[in-house]
Amino acid sequence: MRVPFYDIKAQYDELQAPMDAAVHEVIASGEYSMGPNHNLIEKELAALHGVKHGIALNSGTDALRIIMDAAGIGAGDEVITASFTFVASVETIVQTGARPVFVDIDPATFCIDPAKIAAAITPRTKAIQPVHLFGQLADVAAITQIAKEHNLAVIEDAAQAIGSHHNGTYAGNYGIGAGFSFYVTKNLGAAGDAGLILTNDDAIAEACRSIRVHGMGKQRYYYDHIGYTSRMDEVQAAVLRVKMTKFHEWNERRAQLAAIYLDVLASSELTLPVVSPGNNTTWHQFSIRHGRRDALQQFLKERDVASMIYYPVPIHFHEPYKHFGEGQGSLPESERAAKEILNLPIHPHLSVDQVAYAAKLIAEFCASETSTP
Ligand SMILES: Cc1ncc(COP(=O)(O)O)c(C=O)c1O
């Protein structure tokens, strides 16, 4: 039985009629830039997260960059973040001219460990950027408390946390702004690239809206900021609005599939994902840990079960970022996670049988490992 890691085409197959109609309507309308879908998706996603302002963009990367620009982060500043993340969390800090300061992760959740943040704060620290990895929030209660005590901004990298909350308060409510991604593989994925900023801060919202379009102010061709071309295409907004109709159903499906993995693997010798108290997870990823991860991945591959490694190398080991870190052994949990993590297929178009099959194989592998002398 083949178990693919993603099946984006299956989303289209399920939504073909409304998707074709929505895309056709945009093309036929001639309103390609900041049209009605663009304006509505901003409102709909802001409402979903209980946040005041939504700013639709071309990517999650630009979302993070634009929040930092709007907050005036730049040369001479430091931003605390994780090294065990997708590169965009860090490259955007570097692009502003600020220095990323890496803090290790909590091995249970893969998110930044708040207990290690205080030691990384210096007089140059301007912000903490927690990454809400794999569908659940970082420890937002502890992080916002530290930020308050040290008068620091919090910028949420919520690229993987659409619809994630802690005790009912959603991503987007824990700092000056949150960047979301609708890259094709996300729980809500565009037909290409798209992103979003959510913020409750009126001034940040106004600055972000301006920076999105070259820094233009209220008056056309008068500029308040140095900006970018970062609008969300109207076609992408239309696609996202159609997929929004399935957002909750597809996340519930992911939860059902996660329950199968958790059940079948409960007594196996591996580490299962942990959801922190008060958090939901949208199961953007289902991440296990195993000491012989590469052998397990090969075992699954030979049996047609796909898996991925997010992330094989922490950012502080990559050439362009090495000089910001303190080298091998400086972030032991991030480094260990990179060696042990394996992300299993969990997309909503998998059948129960496919996931049960994958889980059974993993249990088999673990059993054979423990029985080997
Ligand atoms: C943690 C994280 N941050 C930022 C991004 C950047 O988003 P995008 O690919 O939409 O630019 C991603 C997306 O893949 C991500 O996973």
Image (cartoon, rainbow, N blue to C red):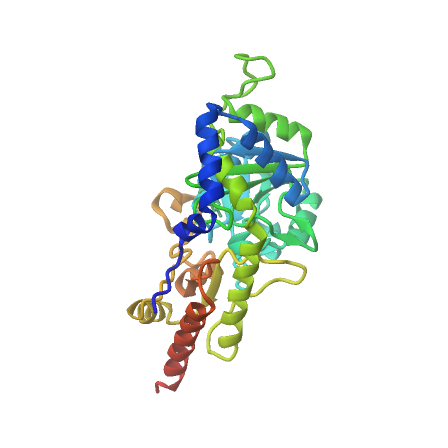
Which residue is located at x 58 percent, y 17 percent?
217
Residue 229 is situated, as x and y percent measured from the top left of the image, at 46, 25
Q: Is residue 180 left or right of residue 314?
A: right
Looking at this view, is 33 or 300 the one in front?
A: 33
Q: Residue furthest left?
A: 302
Looking at this view, is 226 or 202 the one in front?
A: 202
Looking at this view, is 135 or 223 the one in front?
A: 135
Residue 92 is situated, as x and y percent measured from the top left of the image, at 47, 37
Residue 273 appears in the figure:
no
Q: Is residue 205 left or right of residue 94?
A: right
Q: Dividing the picture into quarters, in which one does residue 349 lie? A: bottom left
Which residue is located at x 51 percent, y 35 percent?
237
Query: Relative to 112, is 196 above or below?
Result: above
Quadrant assignment for the N terminus: bottom left
Looking at this view, is 354 or 343 the one in front?
A: 354
Quadrant assignment for the C terminus: bottom left
Query: Relative to 261, is 176 above or below?
Result: above
Which residue is located at x 47 percent, y 47 percent?
15
Residue 332 is situated, as x and y percent measured from the top left of the image, at 46, 61
Query: Relative to 353, is 17 above or below?
Result: above
Query: Relative to 149, is 330 above or below?
Result: below
Q: Is residue 342 left or right of residue 98?
A: left
Residue 201 appears in the figure:
yes
